[in-house]
Image (spheres, rainbow, N blue to C red):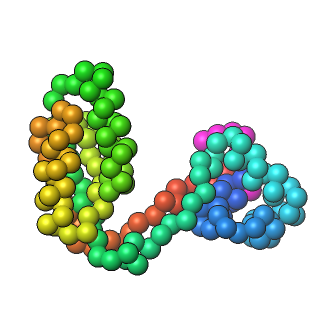
Amino acid sequence: MPLELDRIDFDILDRLQIDASESSSEIAERVGLSQSPCWRRIQRLKEEGYVKHQVAILDREKFGDSMYIFAQLKIGRLTDEERERFIWAIEDIPEITECYTLFGEMDVMIKVLAPSMAWYQNFTFRKLLRLPGVEDVRSTATLSEMKNTHRLPLPRP
């Protein structure tokens, strides 16, 4: 836990996670500060990199039916150049919303937003199996979403 952050800093960060569109005066009221010191703290937290981005979280259901599919990829031995090409390719595919390296039998796990299983089948053959080094893909389709949050559980000093 960073020592330079106090309870009020964590309260401010939590408010920003809940609704980053709140004004500094609204946040100040909620965390028990006056507006100017709260604004200065928000600016410091941003400058120090605690706040990476402020974004709008869209309701994916407004854009039609979709599902998340988690795919684990087995990757063969790659040169440094092939590894870079793999990373660039992953970054260039908008339907891949998250990507992680893994320990264990499989090497990479991705989260794919798919409109249908038929679409995902084509996506697997057209995109995933053509990524540098991909030897195998194991997929798990989601049935429903019970929790989806970007809110980090913050320590309470």
Residue 4 within the magenta-colored segment of the rendering: yes
Q: Is residue 7 rendered magenta in the image?
A: yes
- Residue 39 location (% of width, % of height): 81, 57
- Residue drawn at x 52%, y 56% is 152
User: 136 above or below 68?
Assistant: above
Name the residue at 88% across, 58% down: 36
Q: Can residue 60 be seen in this view?
A: yes
Residue for point 59% across, 48% down: 52
Tell me if I can see residue 6 in this picture.
no
**Is residue 42 placed above or below 91 in the rendered structure?**
below
Q: Where in the figure is residue 108, as x and y percent of width and height?
A: 25, 41
Magenta stretch: give its range.
Answer: 1-8
| Image quadrant assignment for residue 47 | top right
Residue closer to the observer: 86 or 137: 86
| Count of numbered marks | 0
Viewer-side residue, 90 vs 11: 90
Answer with left or right where residue 53 lies relative to residue 67: right
Question: Residue 89 at x, y = what percent?
Answer: 31, 40
Q: Give residue 119's quadrant in the image.
A: bottom left
Residue farthest toward the top in the current orientation of the protein: 79
State the quadrant of the N terminus.
top right
Q: Is the magenta stretch mostly helix, strand or loop?
A: loop
Q: What is the x, y in percent for residue 53?
A: 59, 52
Horizontally, residue 23 falls left or right of residue 131, namely right
